[in-house]
Image (cartoon, coloured by chain):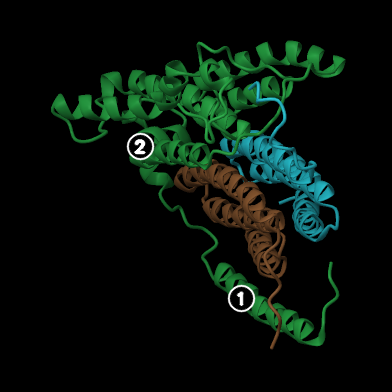
Chain colours: A green, B brown, C cyan
Amino acid sequence: MTKLNNKQRLFRLLLLVLLSVLAAGLGYAVLKLPLQAPGLSTRVTENLVVSGVSNPVTAVLLNFRGYDTLLEMAVLLLALLAVWSLGSQSERRESAPGAVLDMLSRLLIPLFIMVSGYLLWVGAHAPGGAFQAGSVLAAAGVLLLLAGWRPGVWFVGLPLRITLVLGLAMFVAVAVAVQLAGWRLLEFPLPVAGTLILLIEAAATLSIGITLAALFFGHRPQTGQDSGSQTEQGEK
Amino acid sequence: MSSVFFYALTGVGLFTLGLYALIVYTHLLRKILAINVMGSGIFLLLVSLAARTRGAPDPVPHAMVITGIVVAISATALALVLMLRLREASDRVELPEEPME
Amino acid sequence: MTLLQWTFDLVLGFTLLWLAWRTLASEDLFKGIVLFIAFGLLMALAWVRLDAPDIALAEAAIGAGLTGALLLAALAKLTAPKAKPEDSPPHD
């Protein structure tokens, strides 16, 4: 840390005082809240039977506040687009992984995929769901990338883009289909609610996993064609 | 005060700590860490206030916090790439210290 | 609320605050990021104490694991020696 002159010391002291006042005010506001406040939990429990799942958090995420989750998938995609558009090419060469990483990744990645599928399935009636499953899948992707694996050239073109968009697209497709069939936006009719939620969650799991792993990768993966040319920002 | 309010106060403390670090440190990576700590503090506050129910906790703040965690990591990823770009462009990774007049 | 639960909550809360301070104030950024990963894992414990197992799963995977990996990768790129642009073309 750099040495501080007196003015900077005074500034930091003043900042400390102001932030202490802020913390005290927030703490006071928190402590004044009533000890018991059911909030929305009674409303959610009453309507849980028509939501199609029995885990209240999944019901809120995918059914009652489904629009928020739809927008969140869009936010994930936007972040990836922004990262890709910044376009810095890293000169990372593929390196063979060390022995421990090699063996561990071979053991762990099938386990990750299995755990991800389980979390996706169990999210309907126990803690779990699309985000948890998607993040475990992303961890598998990060482990693969760290071990030096790169997806094949056939994948980084259209199939990658389709997988990235799949979650958002499935959500929007279900919303439009439900509305075309006569119900309101994102209102799942009771007989098919569970199935629709599972469908959306499966697509979302794939998308979240791929998007988070791509965010870790950091730049747009190059396809095979332009690895030889020296154009400034990689095309495609 | 039940233990739920203790976690709420911890959340307030984390938020304030993160805010102090955000203002005071000039290195961009520290600022990103500080924003993450602030976010964790806010999530802790939200969920501890949601646990004030008599039976099962209120699931709506839970859903909001899960959404918040995913949005926080996307924002962190974007901020890190911006920081690396800034370093490539200007060869500097700290904000300039402003001279105090 | 038994004494054991109270003690656990107290210790967890103070450890969270202390870890956050050590993360932000550490001289070495690598140490700070590793402490941040530990902070994320303790947050997962706090979520379990607050009856939020879904958030605990998400925080352990995303908040601690993926954010930690992102931060470490960024730190490695920050402190790597600047690569010369006329090196071999990228093989990614």
Which of the two residues, B4 or B44, is positioned nearer the viewer here? B44
Q: Earlier in the sequence, mark 1 or mark 2?
A: 1
The three-letter amino acid code for the residue at tag 2 is Gly
Using a 10 Å C-alpha cutoff, classify the residue at mark 2 as few (fewer than 14 neighbours), some (14 to 19) or many (20 or more). Answer: many
Subunit ID for the residue under disc 2: A
SS of the residue at dot 1?
helix
Judge left or right: residue B47 versus residue C2: left
Q: Is residue A26 above or below residue A228?
A: below
Q: Is residue C36 above or below residue A47?
A: below
Q: Is residue B26 above or below residue A183?
A: below
SS of the residue at dot 2?
helix
Q: Quadrant of residue C20?
A: bottom right
Which of the two residues, A60 or C25, is positioned nearer the viewer here? C25
Taking the image as drawn, is residue B9 in sight?
A: yes
The three-letter amino acid code for the residue at tag 1 is Leu
Q: Quarter of the image containing the C terminus of chain A?
A: top left
Judge left or right: residue A127 versus residue B13: left
Q: Which residue is mark 2?
A: A66
Which of the two residues, C1 or A75, is positioned nearer the viewer here? A75
Residue B1, image x and y in percent? 66, 64
Using a 10 Å C-alpha cutoff, classify the residue at mark 1 as few (fewer than 14 neighbours), some (14 to 19) or many (20 or more). Answer: some
Subunit ID for the residue under disc 1: A
Residue A43, image x and y in percent? 36, 44
Judge left or right: residue B48 versus residue B31: left
Q: Which residue is mark 1?
A: A22
